[in-house]
Image (cartoon, rainbow, N blue to C red):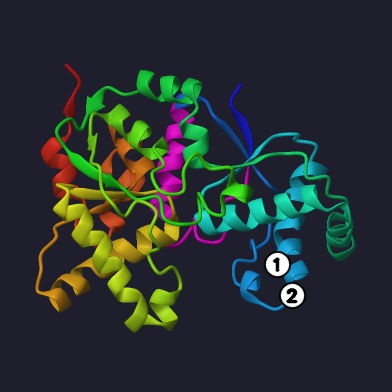
Amino acid sequence: MMRYSYYPGCSMDTTGITYKLSIEYICSKIGMDLREIPGWNCCGATAAHSKSRLTALALPARNLALAEEEGLHLDVAVPCASCYSRMKHTQYAARQDDAVRQQMEEIIGMPYKAEAEVLNFLEIFSQPEVMRACKEKMYRTLKGLKVACYYGCLTSRPVEVTGASSTENPMEMDRIVELTGVQAVDWGYKTECCGASHQVDAPKQARPLLDRIYENAAANGAQAIITACPLCNLNLDMREEDREIVNKRKWNLPVYQFTELLAICMGAGAKEVGLHKHFYPAFSLINEYLKKEV
């Protein structure tokens, strides 16, 4: 049975709502059981930049310890790339140094064994049995649509922590979205940084990072950008229209979570997965290519 402890994180009911809706739609279709960790707290993405390494480790450790305390004994599914990164760093530190793990336990006031794996949804949905289950539930296709799969920088780096297959050319998302009939293009900015929260505090330096992503995706024939992170999706989706005006350049690249494509091809309606909530128009391109399998 496909069962996971589930850490949704702070953004999934707000800026990451389309990711949440589409993940939950898919899971309901394929019978994947997500057990939300009771009483979870912020992953500590901000604390990770503080001077206290232990604080940055302890915040995610509490969530992982809560999952253990519930007796779930399940791997932990984490949708947000920032949350995933913080959880993986904590897991890695606890497994590498028992003294550090014990310090975490003292801070959170509960045991933490670091036994469960931390997985993002690219890792989960790229498993052969999950891909088969998804394909079996699809009766619509987006055949002919060309997309650029954007992984961002945190799902793969640092590789000693994430265990990623590649830090430059990962292929998990490519294989997953191709289940829907789309063609994933070969392009050069798969794992480049989108600027993350620096789009807010350092826009002058961060905005050009987005421009490079749009430009390279369009230059390689993509008609849309596909993401697997609430923050990457928000940055690219919310700021594209403004960047088109600044650059006097029309990229015409709707930005979707990879799970939105899967859900739509399984039969989800536009509002069920939040297509109407996108900043950059997202419905017409899907409507143009979506058809029943023949």
Q: Which mark is residue 56?
A: 1
| Position of residue 74 measured from the top left corner of the image (x, y, whole percent) | 70, 34
The foreground one among 75 and 38 is 75
| Position of residue 90 measured from the top left corner of the image (x, y, whole percent) | 71, 55
Helix, strand or loop at label 2? It is loop
Residue 9 included in the magenta stretch of the image: yes
Q: Amino acid at mark 1?
A: Ala
| Position of residue 125 measured from the top left corner of the image (x, y, whole percent) | 47, 33
| Position of residue 57 measured from the top left corner of the image (x, y, whole percent) | 73, 62
For mark 2, does the 10 Å Cα neighbourhood hold few (<14), some (14 to 19), or many (20 or more) residues?
few
Helix, strand or loop at label 1? It is helix
Q: Is residue 128 above or below residue 283?
A: above
Q: Quadrant of residue 171?
A: top left
* One can see residue 59 in this view: yes
First to last magenta residue range: 6-29
Q: Amino acid at mark 2?
A: Ser
Q: Is residue 8 above or below residue 108?
A: above
Q: Are marks 1 and 2 in contact (CB under 8 Å)?
A: yes
Residue 15 included in the magenta stretch of the image: yes
The foreground one among 177 and 212 is 212
* One can see residue 279 in this view: no
For mark 1, does the 10 Å Cα neighbourhood hold few (<14), some (14 to 19), or many (20 or more) residues?
many
- Which quadrant does the N terminus fall into? top right
Give the residue drawn at x 15%, y 41%. Answer: 287
Give the residue drawn at x 40%, y 69%. Answer: 195
Give the residue drawn at x 56%, y 61%. Answer: 10
Can you identify the residue that label 2 sits on? 52
Give the residue drawn at x 20%, y 74%. Answer: 242
Left or right: 263 with respect to 102? left
- Mark 1 to mark 2 CA distance (whole Å): 7 Å
